[in-house]
Structures are given as C-alpha cells and as structure tokens.
Amino acid sequence: MNTRQLRHFLAVMDLGSLSAAAERVHLSLPALSRSLSALEEALGVPLFDRQGRRLRPTPYADAYVERARRMVFDEKEGARSLSLMRAGESGTLSFGMGSSIARSLLGPMMLKLVAEAPGLRLSAMVQSSDVLFDALRKERLDFFVGDVRIAAHEPDMVAEPAYVSTFGWFARAGHPLAGRKRIGMPELSAHPMVMAGYADRSVIRRIAELYGLSMPLENHFALNTDDVNTIHTLVASSDAIAPSTDIAVISALRAGTMVALDVEPRLDLDMTLGIVRHVGRTLVPAAERAFAIVRAYFADVAQEVVRQRGRVPVKKKGAVR
C-alpha cells in the first residue's frame, strides 16, 4: 500500500465513477482498476462493489476514507515541512552561549532568526563553556558559542574560531580611577571589586599571580556572582570595579557608561571564542543562518574594540547588535 493508491481510492470515493476518477488521476481505466485491487489486497478487505463501470463503496471503504485522507494529507505536509527545512525556513535549533556573549547577542540573534524564518523553533541555554560542552556531547544542543579551546583535543568536535577576546579591568564612566595611568592593586582594592563566579580557574590563578593575591581569590572581592547583568549594574551605578573580557562589556563601552582602566600589570589573558559543534552531525539548514549571525556579531565586536582603542573611526554596519 502507498499513498498513490490512497489518492486513487479517494478520487473514486469523491467522484463515484471509475472513469471520472481515472481522468482526475491521469490513469487508464485498467490501470486504476489494478491500483484499487492492489489496495484491497493490501488491506485484506473489499472497498467497492463493482456494478458495471460504477463502484459502490462498501462499509469498509466508508470506515477507511477519513483515515486515508489524513494519511495523504500527512504525506503532503511532511514533504512541505522537509521543503521548508531545506530552505532554512523551519525546523528545531537548540544552541547555547556564555553569559558574557549572550548579553549582547542572544536576544537580537533569536529575533533575527524568527523574523527571517517564522517556522523555526528555537531553544537556548546560557551557561559556562564547560556546561555547554557537556550538553553538546549529550546532544541536547546542536552547537554552542563560547571558548573553543575546550574542543581543541576532541576528535568528534569541530571548533570555528571567530574572535580573540582580551581581559581587562573596567569601571563606570566618571569613576575616580578613570583616566588615571598605571593603576596598581592598592588603588584598585580601595574600591569594591566584583567578579563573575563562572570564571575559568586558569583566569582566577592568573589574576592572583599577577596582583599578588592569595587564594581563594574570591576572598578579595566584595561580590562574586554568575550573573553578568548584576555585575554590570553594580559597576555602572557605583564605584565598584570588575575584571572582565572585552566582549562582556562591549555594549557598555559603546554606550559610554563604562571605561577600561589602565591597570599595571596588564591582565595579560585572552580567550578564543567561536562556534563548537559535532563533527559529521547533520543540522537543519537554519543553523547556517545562525552561524552567519554569530560571525557578523564577532566581526562587529572586533571593529568596536579597535575603535575603543582609538585606532579607527566608527563605521556603521548591518551586523546584529
């Protein structure tokens, strides 16, 4: 049994005539008759009583007709869904990103994807790269945007580097230390220091080493939280100071509400950010839309960071902000 036979059956049911049905489905009368006989054989019941060239539906046909309609409809809808997926217009996409990236990328990215492809179903996880990597391994995510170093020695993963993020110390615009040169730890520690609790352990060790701070490092900070938004709120509205990646504060730097401090020694750390996904795993075509948005975002961030360092003037772009 196949849906072609079901369409032949439905044509006869709708028109009540073998010849009219044959014309609708573009078959000869003998060919249509053979198709109906094959369907009856597959189902194991008679669907029509033959009366000359007319067919009278049996109770089996009356009982089966709506189910046949649903099967034909489902086949059409299934083909349509696959066609939309091939065009990147539908499907399910699950992805993750770190909170510092999500602050400026996640909302605009999801809005852009839904606007371009309303049939998409999206889900997003905001977590540290190690948690995202575990979710990717367990196939709860299709990809994540974060620290690509975590996949460096994983043969079943592929990482696409997109941006090298640097670290620094940041405060609100107008902070007492803003504009000062060669600020040391004594000047920093005179103000409340806040840090993100999800920071990589290598970052924490390096901060302690550079500034002569004892471990655990958290004891030297007034606040330790996983919520980047809380850190930004505190820094923007008080004299608090925070070590951070440039990408986590790029929106505030662009808006002029936060500034980078000239701290010595410089926080000489960097982190390569990009897209991490499974090798050989087929993703819905809409994933390429998402990847393009991520690449444009990182290109925009790179330009903005250079501008903040006073190297080039602002250039307006169409990238996601």
Image (cartoon, helix red, strand yellow):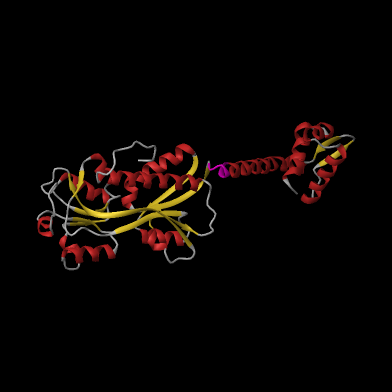
Relative to 223, say whether 253 is above or below: above
Residue at screen point 85% across, 41% down:
31
Q: Is residue 148 left or right of residue 34?
A: left
310 to 281, vertically: above or below:
above
Q: Is residue 154 left or right of residue 271?
A: right
Q: Is residue 87 magenta?
A: yes
Question: Which residue occupies the foreground of this view, 62 or 312?
Answer: 312
Give the magenta part as a residue range.
Answer: 84-88
**Residue 58: x percent and y percent?**
79, 41
Q: Main secondary structure of the magenta part?
A: helix
Of the pair 306 and 269, the residue shown nearer to us: 306
Q: Position of residue 173 (x, y in %)?
A: 17, 43
Residue 145 seen: no
On whether residue 248 falls in the magenta region, the answer is no
Which image quarter: residue 8?
A: top right
Task: Where is residue 305? Give x, y as percent.
Answer: 29, 46
How many discs mark residues in the rendered view? 0
Q: Residue at x 20, y 45 (%)?
A: 258
For the residue pair 109 and 186, the one nearer the viewer reads as 186
Residue 120, given in percent of the width and then of the height, sits at 49, 43
